[in-house]
Amino acid sequence: MSKTATMQDSQQDAVQKACRFIDSFDERLPTLAHVAEHVGLSPSHFQKLFKRMVGLSPRQYAESRRVSRVKALLRDGEDVASAMYGAGYGSSSRLYEAADATFGMTPATYRKGGAGAEIHYAFADCLLGRTLVAATARGVCFVAFDDRDDALLDELADEFPAADLTPDDGRLSIWAKEVVRRVDGRAPNNALPLDVRATAFQWRVWRALTEIPAGETRTYSQIAATLGKPTAQRAVGRACATNPVSILVPCHRAVREDGGLAGYRWGLERKETLIEREAATAKPKKRAKAKAA
């Protein structure tokens, strides 16, 4: 084994050991110095290594794990106060501050299936038929594809059964055009804000998907390997399947180990179309770069 490979294995072991250590804290969060000491690295070196391999700082990872415990308690029927204290939050302000970045809505709203959340939606024609783009005041929360508007609206209602769903008054037109642009295989023109609920691992998978060049695909195991979790291909598949903002998070770029198309919420034909369109759009750019070189 090469020296580089040995170093990478050592770094992965250190980060995995740190994650297990952080996960062992049910209430108070460990300090950076405490975790770094546990894995035998200096705080500054550990901070850089952890963020490079995980995509989050140690503090962000620890906070996301604690919010995940709140979610689990809420799903089990706990009230917000009990879930808050059960996960180690000493005050509601700290919980709501963390929830603002990870829930996509307040804990109370999450527990009630989106009750009280106001979501606007718009339809647009695209290469895949019709698309629905839905958003809260904070960002896009849902993107779907079908041939019928009523089916798309049913999908949105299933996703947010207790939310206030309202037809858009024109504010979503720019965001909807951006979604159509990406369906056409063109490079992103605008960075769209997202308002989605996700675990730390889901965010890592989704970030990895956005880093796959347009026109290319990766297997689930390849994506898992980039996350430092080579045996987590099934978990990667689940993260792709639960992606609520198709195209913006390009889960269509994930394929089976043999290169075949795996399940896609909006149908394998649409997945194939997206991959082929991106590949066709990317080829002229690659030829132009090669010619310039």
Image (cartoon, rainbow, N blue to C red):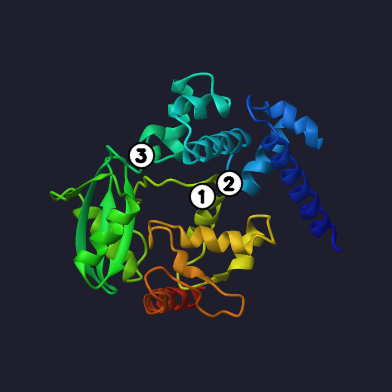
How packed mark 2 is, by other alpha carbons closer than 10 Å (few <14, some 14-19, many 20 or more), is some
Report x, y in % for residue 127.
27, 74
Q: Is mark 3 on a helix, strand or loop?
A: loop
Residue 55 — which label?
Answer: 2
Query: Residue drawn 44% across and 29% down?
Result: 80
Mark positioned earlier in the residue sequence (1 or 3): 3
Given the image, on which type of amino acid does mark 1 rest? Trp
Choose between 49 and 102: the one closer to the eye. Answer: 102
Residue 112 — which label?
Answer: 3
Q: Is mark 2 on a helix, strand or loop?
A: loop
Residue carrying label 1: 203
**Looking at the picture, does residue 27 appear above or below residue 187?**
above
Choose between 130 and 47: the one closer to the eye. Answer: 130
Q: Distance between the residues labelled 2 and 3?
A: 30 Å
Indicate left or right for 18 with 124 as reference: right
Q: Are marks 1 and 3 in contact (CB under 8 Å)?
A: no
Q: How far apart are marks 1 and 2 (CA)?
A: 9 Å
Q: Are marks 2 and 3 in contact (CB under 8 Å)?
A: no
Given the image, on which type of amino acid does mark 2 rest? Gly
Mark positioned earlier in the residue sequence (2 or 3): 2
Q: From this viewpoint, is residue 149 visible?
A: yes
Q: Where, by quadrant of the figure, is residue 109 drawn?
A: top left
Report x, y in % for residue 268.
42, 77
**Looking at the picture, does residue 82 appear above or below residue 235?**
above
